[in-house]
Each structure stands twice: as structure tokens, then as C-alpha cells.
Image (spheres, helix red, strand yellow):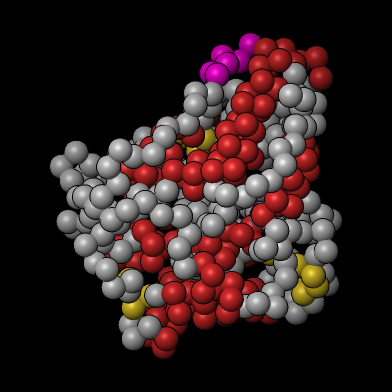
């Protein structure tokens, strides 16, 4: 994260010839009639309305007696988002790493103080491509039977580990999927985080470091990953995740805007709050992302077309200044490709969750025209 957790941590599939659907398939081998029967017999959980903003968004102790850190048990899910991993390890989310959208919105607000529309936008855009609309459950890591029987393919209820959904290339502490592991903490990538913090932040991670590191990460993937891609919606997530640690991993009593590297490691690697950690004071979204985007004003979304060092611009992708193109393409292309002809409860669940996504988009002051892929 999960990235990114704006952190328009829209997290959807790359629609082009350079990226295929994830290998995970649901209910494979069944006929259309059998698939419809499977969907009809799955217990339908109508999606409840998302939680509203906190009544009190002041700083407070969150690493407390009610939310102690507990190590993972066999079968617990953790994935690419250090924020969600940490919240699960402290019990703000179910400790097994399988949660409803409402639980996620509540957890990121209560534990980290994400602004409500921001929390809803990230959650429902993620859930629509990684979660199970029928059971209203999503894994913050890999695919698991704990999310219940899956809708028919091409839907992928594969959790946040799914490449180019929440997770994507140029992560700060996770590897590009091409190299085999896109969700585990990688020390060599964290050492880039340390190196740039020492060089540009006097040993701390701040907005200046975030911009410099983002530039390096993009160029590094262009030079090393023959299947590198950074297009909408992942391009929004990548730039936003650069500032997420500054906004949410610094103790709320500390107003310096400088993230200590030991604290960063606690979140990124150990999935735990530092001792006596207080959440930030006042809910926010993606403060500081303009520092990163302004540092790279000429960057346009694209991908390596012919192996390493063959980056080309993708003219079909929304750019960082086109949030409504991102929204429209996400709904009409990404969601429609996963769910081309839903019926019954599945169709109803998708319409409800798409409405929640649009409401979060409007609340975030993106005045986009609503689209209805499955009718009003």
C-alpha cells in the first residue's frame, strides 16, 4: 500500500498489450450456467454505507493497550501496503488481514487520521478490483479462501498483491513484479530510501527527499525492468505514496515534517507502530504531493515497449492532471473488463460500490461526470 495510498491510490489493471490479467483465476472450468448458479448460491452481503469522518481528529495515542502489536499467525495476510499491514498487526483491522471496506475506512481514519473522502476513495477503488463484491471482503495481501466464493472470471479476487492494482512498479520498499516478488519488504530498496534521506534530508525523509527518490525509482525501473509500466491509475498511486510516510508515519506531536529512518523501518519492514506512537494531528489527504509532481513536470505515463530503456509515452493513460479521465477510464474500462456482464446480486453490489467511489470522488473536489456501466 497499498500505495497509494491525492495518493490516488487508484489501483486498477493496466489495459494494454504490455500487461496481462493476473494468473489467479476464479471458478475456472465451469460453464456459464454453472458460474451463474455459483454466484446465485453465494451468500450476498449488501455493502453498507461507508463510515463518515471522525468526530475528533486530534492527535492521540494509537499504539495503546487496546491495540497491541501481535506477530502474524499462519494464514494471516500482509501485502504491499505498510500502512494496512501495520493497522492489521495492531488490531485496527482484523488481524488475519481480511476486511470489509467499511473496516478499512474506519481503520485508516482511527489509526492514521486519513481524511474521510481520501480514505473512501482509496478503499473503494481498491476494493472494486481486488475484493469480493458478493461477500464484501478483501485481502490486504494474497488471494485467500477467507474472502469467500469468487465471482466468475475474468474477475480477480486476488487481494492487494495483484500486480498493477494496488501494487505497482517503482515502489519504495517492494520490488517490481517482473523480478518475482512484488509484496515483501526488500532491504536493498529500503537502502535507497536511506541513501536519499542522507543525501537530501540530513538523515531524515521529507518532501524534498520524496521528489528526488521518486525520480530515481522511475529511472531505475526503466533501466532494469523490461516490462516496466507506470500508467493510470498506478501513476497516481506512485507519486502519492512518495509523501504518504511523511504525512502519516511521523508522530502527531512532531511538527517537523521529518521522518526518522528507524520509524520508517518500523512501518515498512516490521509492520508495527513505534512505541508511544500518536497519530497525526488533524485529518489530511495527500499534502505535499505537489512537491513531487512539480519536481518532475515533464513526466508522462508510459511503459517500456521493447525491453529495458525503451520507455514510451502511453497516450491513452490519464496524466497526473486528469483525475476525471482516470475515473472514467477506471470505471468504463477496468471494472467493465473484470465484470463484463454481471447479473443479480453481483450487478447490484457493483453498482452500490461504484456509487460509493463516485461520492468519494466528488467529496475530494474532482467534479467528474458520473458514469454508469451497469445502468442507473
What range of the chain is rendered magenta?
41-46
> Is 110 a magenta residue?
no
Residue 135 versus residue 276 in the image, above or below: above
Most common SS among magenta residues: loop
Residue 303 quadrant = bottom right
Viewer-proximal residue among 308 and 43: 43
Residue 134 versus residue 297 in the image, above or below: above
Q: Is residue 182 left or right of residue 14?
A: left
Query: Residue 60 placed where, x, y %?
Result: 21, 50
Query: How many numbered dots are placed on residues in this image?
Result: 0
Instruction: Pick the quarter of the image with the C terminus.
Output: top right
Q: Is residue 356 left or right of residue 332?
A: left
Query: Residue 300 placed where, x, y %?
Result: 72, 71
- Residue appearing at x 75%, y 67% in the figure: 302
> Is 42 a magenta residue?
yes
- Residue appearing at x 75%, y 32% in the figure: 372
Viewer-proximal residue among 334 and 304: 334
Residue 197 quadrant = bottom left
Visible residue check, residue 350: yes
- Residue appearing at x 67%, y 54% in the figure: 323
Residue 269 quadrant = bottom left
- Residue appearing at x 57%, y 33% in the figure: 356
Amino acid at each position: 500500500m497499498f500505495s497509494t495510498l491525492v495518493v490516488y491510490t487508484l489501483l486498477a489493471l493496466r489495459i494494454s498489450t504490455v500487461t496481462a490479467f493476473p494468473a489467479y483465476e476464479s471458478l475456472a472450468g465451469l460453464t456459464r450456467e454453472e458460474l451463474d448458479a455459483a454466484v446465485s448460491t453465494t451468500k450476498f452481503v449488501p455493502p453498507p454505507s461507508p463510515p463518515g469522518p471522525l468526530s475528533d481528529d486530534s492527535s492521540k495515542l494509537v499504539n495503546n493497550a487496546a491495540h497491541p502489536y501481535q506477530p502474524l499467525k499462519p494464514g494471516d495476510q500482509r501485502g504491499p501496503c505498510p500502512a494496512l499491514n501495520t493497522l492489521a498487526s495492531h488490531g485496527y483491522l482484523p488481524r488475519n488481514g481480511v476486511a470489509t471496506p467499511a473496516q478499512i475506512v474506519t481503520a485508516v481514519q482511527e489509526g492514521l487520521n486519513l481524511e474521510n473522502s481520501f480514505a473512501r476513495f482509496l478503499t473503494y477503488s481498491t476494493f472494486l478490483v481486488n475484493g469480493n463484491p458478493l461477500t464484501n471482503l478483501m485481502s490486504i495481501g494474497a488471494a485467500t479462501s477467507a474472502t469467500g466464493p469468487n465471482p466468475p472470471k475474468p474477475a480477480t479476487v486476488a487481494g492487494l498483491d495483484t500486480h498493477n492494482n494496488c501494487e505497482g512498479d517503482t515502489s519504495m520498499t517492494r520490488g517490481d513484479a517482473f523480478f518475482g516478488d512484488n509484496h515483501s519488504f526488500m532491504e536493498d530498496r529500503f537502502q535507497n530510501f536511506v541513501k536519499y534521506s542522507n543525501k537530501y534530508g540530513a538523515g531524515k525523509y521529507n518532501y524534498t527527499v520524496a521528489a528526488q527518490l521518486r525520480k530515481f525509482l522511475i529511472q531505475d525501473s526503466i533501466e532494469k525492468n523490461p516490462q516496466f509500466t507506470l500508467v493510470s491509475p498506478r501513476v497516481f498511486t506512485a507519486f502519492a505514496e512518495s509523501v504518504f510516510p511523511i504525512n502519516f508515519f511521523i508522530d502527531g506531536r512532531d511538527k517537523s515534517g521529518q521522518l526518522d529512518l528507524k520509524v520508517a523501518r518500523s512501518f515498512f519492514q516490521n509492520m508495527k507502530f513505534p512505541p508511544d506512537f500518536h497519530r497525526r494531528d488533524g485529518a489530511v489527504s495527500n499534502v505535499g504531493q505537489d512537491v513531487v509532481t512539480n519536481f518532475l513536470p515533464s513526466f508522462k505515463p508510459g511503459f517500456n515497449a521493447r525491453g529495458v530503456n525503451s520507455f514510451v509515452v502511453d497516450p491513452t493513460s490519464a496524466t497526473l492532471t486528469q483525475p476525471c479521465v482516470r475515473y472514467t477510464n477506471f470505471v468504463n474500462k477496468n471494472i467493465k473488463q473484470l465484470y463484463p456482464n454481471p447479473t443479480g446480486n453481483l450487478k447490484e453490489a457493483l453498482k452500490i460500490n461504484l456509487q460509493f467511489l463516485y461520492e468519494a470522488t466528488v467529496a475530494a473536489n474532482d467534479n467528474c461526470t458520473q458514469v454508469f456501466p451497469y445502468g442507473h
